[in-house]
Amino acid sequence: MALSRVMGIIAAGLAIAGAVAAFAIVWRPAIATIEPSSPQSFDAALVRHGRDLAAIGNCSDCHTLRGGKDFAGGVAVPTPFGTIYSSNITPDTETGIGSWPEAAFRRAMRSGVDREGRHLYPTFPYDHFTNVSDEDDRALYAYLMTRPPVHAIARKNQLSFPLDQRFVVAGWKLLFLRHGTYQPDTAQSAEWNRGAYLVEGLAHCGACHTPRNALGAERATAQFAGAEVDKWHAYAINGQSPAPVPWNADALFTYLRQGWQADHGVARGPMAEVVANLSTVPDSDIHAIATYMASVFGVPTPDHRLRADEVLAQANSGTTRLPSQASNPDATGAAIYAAACAGCHETDRALPYGGINLALSTALSSPDARNAANIILSGVRPSEEERGPIMPGFAAGMSDDQVAALLIYLRARFSKQPPWAGIATTIADARRSQTVSLQTSAASPNAAADATKREKP
Amino acid sequence: MMKLKVNGHDHNIDADLDTPLLYVLRDDLKLNAAKFGCGLGQCGSCTVIVDGNAVLSCVTPLLLLEGKQVTTLEGLGTIEAPAPIQRAFMDEQSAQCGYCIAGMMMRAQALLQKNPRPTDAQIRSEMELNLCRCGTHMRILRAVHRAARLMQTADASPVQGSAQ
């Protein structure tokens, strides 16, 4: 009797403690609204700095609809769990973040909680943004609060129960949100540390390039190992990179600065948006990102280096045909390549005036045929206000069988990898999505190829 | 030697299979509506229809066309009996120098075959690939809307442009 009463008291105590703990995990207080400050009250230099940071954070990619008003949200972000719509981050007081004090903005960045205390879904990558410093959050806040306010009501997310309940996100955070994961490494240079701070924080490179687990969190053990994003394959950008020529800091700088690099090719798909945004960011930050990422890619093995040198020598000799890897290459694919592709891809004209020698193509050496299929179907559209490579798309001109024959041939001839599996499915998928996902996006609010524009926030 | 079906007729083409369709149309078949613009598939002046899709004929080698149906502007209508798309472009006086117009009409035709009532945004998005350096875009846009209406009503009014 006494024992059971004691047990009962203990059980009740545990239940109460559990409820208190759950409450503490889930509940976040609202932060009081403010009257928005006038745009002129913000320091101009801080606003300019904020713009550079917003460009590094690629904010517009998710928060600006194609052809829509800057940062007004409403972009559908498809996830395995349902569709989540980005929010309006203009300073509109009713539908945007105009009445948010800086502390509320900082809390959203740091902990993924909105001003009213609701948990935000981790499609907003606060698992990275938690690493952003207070000073940088202040600059971002100054930049966003001085944009034109847009009245645009957020669309309702399409999530099924229980994921439509925001308290569930609190549990996710308990498992996967780690504050202060970025720690400076004193053994490394200041530039490396700046790069690490940007890459792991605001630039959130891992959000696309790191594969996710069943609960949608980045797998810590597979950082930068490559993943599927928006119908594209985001390549591995660590030691497992499929690039035939290993990346180094110089090549990365050039690629991130101008959107293409002679030994690697062109940024396409979601990455095209990233480099368009980076086009206004100071050289020093791009150098820092390149320096850090070069160390993530690591030093190539002597074997890899040797193969890369061979491929480069052959590619740079222009007209020299590379030896075929396949003993009996697909004749249809070979004929299509010779007639439709070689005219640009096998000349002595270097990028951007000719096509990249396909022996240098990461897409063809990638474990997934998706990017190669996308590019054959849709080509490479010229980027606004910038010089860069172009390629016509062949979606209307080639049947699925012809694309398949071409892919099989290209893989056999230009990569040292085994044939792709399931090419027919890949092509069908790529064709379904190509009209939707590959159209050029709205000009980025950050993109300004003219360097003089940088001084005007 | 290859059999090529253009505007409903079979042609025996004596050309290498890597020859671009545009060259065969203009040089061998004397169908000169499709124009050579950039030769890189970037301007759209060479646009023709292949199996219902708008295709850039300057970057489409013959070997991709085995068993497919090619339609050029000549296959849509004649001066005496213009097709709705041609009548609409004339009615709206959409051509200035005219170099892009055949390609514009072919892409618009392909669009209207798939989507008989496109919105303004759909027309703009579809026609984005075809360039006009004279700047007649607003008239082209109106012409595509007019063509959509003509195709649905079998309009028989006289061609205003040619009646001046």
Image (tube, rainbow, N blue to C red):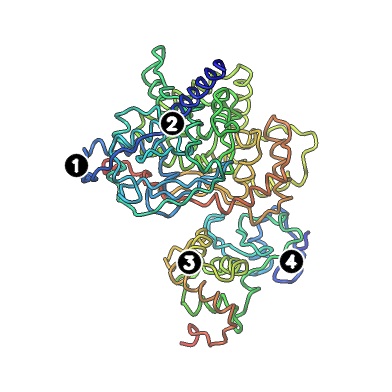
Q: Amino acid at mark 3?
A: Asp
- Chain label for disc 2: A
Q: CA distance from mark 2 to mark 3?
A: 52 Å
Q: Is A234 on the left-hand or right-hand side of A107?
A: right
CB under 8 Å between callouts 1 and 2? Answer: no
Residue shown at the point (73%, 41%) measured from the top left: A422
**Is label 4 or label 2 in front?**
2
Q: CA distance from mark 1 to mark 2?
A: 39 Å
**Is label 1 or label 3 in front?**
1
**Is label 1 or label 2 in front?**
2
The circle on residue A23 is: 2
Which SS class for mark 1? helix
> Which residue, given by chain and number where applicable, does mark 1 sit on?
A41
Same chain shared by disc 4 and disc 2: no
The circle on residue B5 is: 4
Residue A267 in sight here: yes
> Which residue, given by chain and number where applicable, does mark 3 sit on?
B120
Q: CA distance from mark 1 to mark 4?
A: 69 Å
Residue A44, quarter of picture: top left
Residue A259 in sight here: no
